[in-house]
Amino acid sequence: MQYPSKQDVEQVLEPLYSPIHSSFHSAFQQLKQATVDSWAIFTTRSRASSFRDYLVHDLTDAFEQYDNIHRIEQRGMVLWVIEEKVALRIKKLDDNLVSSNHYTQQSLDFVNQQLLLPGIDEIIALNMGYVPNEIWTKIDGIYITCPLGTRKVLWAIDINDKIDSTQTTTALYVDDEDEEERRVRVRVKNQELFEGGYHNEAGGDN
C-alpha cells in the first residue's frame, strides 16, 4: 500500500489526543505507586512490560466511549482499530522514535505497512509510542509514529505538543471571553450612570 500522509491520519486521530495523553500518564503513575517498594530493582525490560499491561487496561477503558474504535488481539499483538482505517499498537521508542523489536513476520508486516487484519483490505499501522527518561521516573514524550521499515520513521505526531496547543488555544479563548465580558459590564455600568445615577447625583432630573 502507499504510505499514508500525516495530514490524512491526523483527521482520524485528533479526537484521541487527549485520552491517549491522559492514559499514558495515568498508567505510569499507577505503575509507580503499585511498585514503589520494588521499582528500583526493576529492569528496563520489566518496567516496559509492566507499563504496557497498565496502559492496555487504561487505553481500553478510555476508548470504550468511541463507537468507531475496537480492540483486537492477533498473535499476541494488541491493536486498536479506528474506523477500519488505522491500527494503533503500544511501543517503547528510542530517542530517534524508532521501536525496538524482536521481529516476527507479523511485526515486520506492521512496520512495512503490510499488516493483514480479518475483514479489512488495507490498514495504516501506527505506533502509539512513548519515550521515558533515562531513569524511568517520568515519560518525556508520547508520539504517534508511522514506521518506515525497521529503523526509520516516516513521520511523527507529538502528542504533548498537540495537548499544549489545545490548552493554549482554550486559554486564549477564555481570556478573550473574559475581556469581552468586562467590556460589556463597563458598557452597562456607563449606561446605568448615564440614565440614572449620574443625572440624579447632579440634580439634573429634580
Image: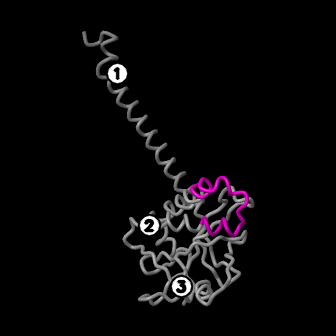
x, y percent for residue 25: 57, 57
- Give the label on residue 61, or none: none
Residue at mark 1 to residue at mark 3: CA–CA distance = 75 Å
Q: Quadrant of residue 107?
A: bottom right
* Left or right: 13 as drawn, with respect to 130: left
Query: Which of the two labelled residues, at mark 2 and mark 1, occupies the earlier sequence position?
Result: 2
Q: Check the image and report above or below for 143 versus 81.
A: above
Query: Which of the two labelled residues, at mark 3 and mark 2, occupies the earlier sequence position?
Result: 2
| Residue, disc 1 | 193
The structure residue drawn at horizontal position 73% and vertical position 60%, both measured from the top left corner, is 41
Observer-side mark, 3 or 2, equals: 3
Disc 3 marks a residue whose amino acid type is: Arg
Residue at mark 3 to residue at mark 2: CA–CA distance = 21 Å
x, y percent for residue 121: 45, 90
| Residue, disc 3 | 75
The structure residue drawn at horizontal position 61% and vertical position 67%, both measured from the top left corner, is 143
Quadrant position of the N terminus in the picture: bottom right
- Over which residues does the magenta segment extend? 29-51
Secondary structure mostly taken by the magenta-highlighted segment of the chain: helix
Observer-side mark, 1 or 3, equals: 3
**In the displayed image of the protein, which residue is found farthest to the right?**
134
Q: Quadrant of residue 82?
A: bottom left
The structure residue drawn at horizontal position 46% and vertical position 72%, both measured from the top left corner, is 12
Callout 3: helix, strand or loop?
loop
**In the displayed image of the protein, which residue is found farthest to the left?**
206
Question: Label 2 neighbourhood size at 10 Å, few (<14), some (14-19), many (20+)?
Answer: some
| Residue, disc 2 | 63
